Image: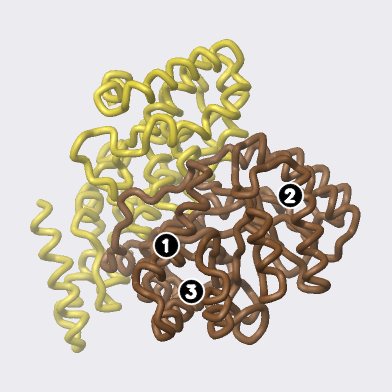
Chain colours: A brown, B yellow
Amino acid sequence: MRIFDPHAHMTSRTTDDYEAMYASGVRALVEPAFWLGQPRTYVGSFIDYFNSLLGWERFRSGQFGIRHHCTIGLNPKEANDENLARELIDILPRFLAKDGVVAVGEIGFDAMTAAEEWALREQLKLAVEFELPVLVHTPHRDKAHGTRRTIELVLESGIEPGMVVIDHNNELTVKDVLDSGCWAGFSIYPGTKMDEYRMVRVAEEHGLERVLVNSACDWGVSDPLKVRKTADKMAEAGFSEDDIDRLVWRNPVEFFGQSNRLILDDIESPDLSATYEGSGVLRGERA
Amino acid sequence: MKNLSEALEARATPEGLEWLREAQAAVAADPTALRTKFPMVGRKVGRGTLEEGADPADVHAWTVDDAARVLLLQAAGAGAEAELADLYRFGDAAERRGVLRALPFLDIGDRGLGLVDDAIRTNDTRLIAAALGPYATEHLSDAQYDQAIIKCVFVGVPITPLDGLPERVTPDASRMLAAFVLERVTAGRDLPAEVWTVIDKYPPAEEIAAIEATLNSPYEDRRAAAERALSYRSQQV
């Protein structure tokens, strides 16, 4: 089984996770820029973070045979530091021009503030300018209302809805999102946002068109193997191999392929001898 | 790398070359255009190896985008230097590699040395390899070059293709690599055979005696590692 995890914060994960993901079938992923659990207070902290997504993390992932892409953007939580947000929006174009940057994101709402709305609108404009898809985060609190407001702003911005994935959906938001023409993302989490059993029901009810599933694994309680676990539950429920391939590979390739920046040529198996004898991720061998 | 343009013409598509010609004209007219053109090179001109049949996993091998980025920087003329540090700072790994590859082609004296230092400090093997071209051979101090060789061996960058070898090898480099072999032998582990070309430029008696003494170690894994290390040595002579 080939898997493309369209949302995984690998910077927070270990090399064991990379090995297990590869073993589960993951060959490509997208790491959205997000917050780090504690707010950044300097624009330089974002620059270093973006550079690590484009440099070190891509290299690290490649050591395990997984092609790494990222999204670049100002997340909603940190959009509330208004001076910092303005400084950051000014430097985003430099990063949005790069290979392997396959969307603007994660952007969206957290607490539904005016500052968050401003940052969302500005970044939707940048997405249009750079002809990039958009990855939108929906709030954990007041989710249904936040999701509807997000859809309104997306449609107002003039971006093609098919260029937008609205993420972290549940049973109560999916219909609005799919009806809008946007893609619907589902983060399969241990016990919270959405689990693999519920996801099977969503897929049965709404089909697979414009649907993405991801692990959204990060520094919190999360599981980088959730895409595979969802695929396995779908197989048990009677979905065909082709359906599953569509959901976990062809759909994310189609969505992020709209950036023309996916790098999926010559995906190779990891060279384990290189990994253990000469790799840049080998602990204890560092200068 | 005799002629980058010719090599590139053999490997890039007509559309890619046409894009590059336009980009070269744009940066010649306004070097700040590098800020948008430089990141686009990979998807416009290509990312494969510059030499047909070269191993894409070889960190020393030039790529099509490396060559195109060098030509783009050259096209910016004297205006390239003012853009260089920010192209590197805001560059992804491929862009940084392009900047590093370009250093010996630009008229910047030793003012690119800070970028070479930065790249050697990373753990990204492609950046380390790209930093150690002819520019590093010309400008790094002996102590810096010694450390760079050791770093390569440490992170798995093959040293035989390094531009500065064997000329830049010092007695210190020979001693440090011999000590590294001893450390590995004591752990029952190996280093690549090629380290002996550096060690045997100025063979350090003390470290080599210690490696040879390990042939009589009471521990089987150490004896075996010492045998392997010394057999690598005889292969290199």
Instruction: Report the residue at 44% width, 21% height from top.
Output: B19
Amino acid carrying label 3: it is: Val
Q: In this view, does A147 lie to the left or right of A271?
A: right
In front: mark 1 or mark 2? 2
Q: How far apart are marks 1 and 3 (CA)?
A: 10 Å
Q: State whether residue B205 is above or below residue B220.
A: above
| Secondary element type, mark 1 | helix
Q: In this view, does B13 lie to the left or right of A257?
A: left
In front: mark 3 or mark 2? 2
| Secondary element type, mark 2 | helix
Q: Is residue B121 left or right of residue A169?
A: left
Query: Which numbered disc covers residue A112?
Result: none
Mark 2 surroundings: few (<14), some (14-19) or many (≥20) residues within 10 A: many
* Residue that badge 2 annotates: A154
x, y percent for residue A239: 41, 77
Amino acid carrying label 1: it is: Trp
Q: Distance between the residues labelled 3 and 2?
A: 27 Å
x, y percent for residue A205: 57, 75
Amino acid carrying label 2: it is: Val
Please tell me which of labels 1 and 3 falls first in the chain: 3
* Residue that badge 3 annotates: A227
* Residue that badge 1 annotates: A249
Of the pair A51 and A239, the residue shown nearer to us: A239
x, y percent for residue B235: 9, 56
- Which subunit holds the residue at mark 2? A
Please tell me which of labels 1 and 2 falls first in the chain: 2
Question: Marks 3 and 2: same chain?
Answer: yes
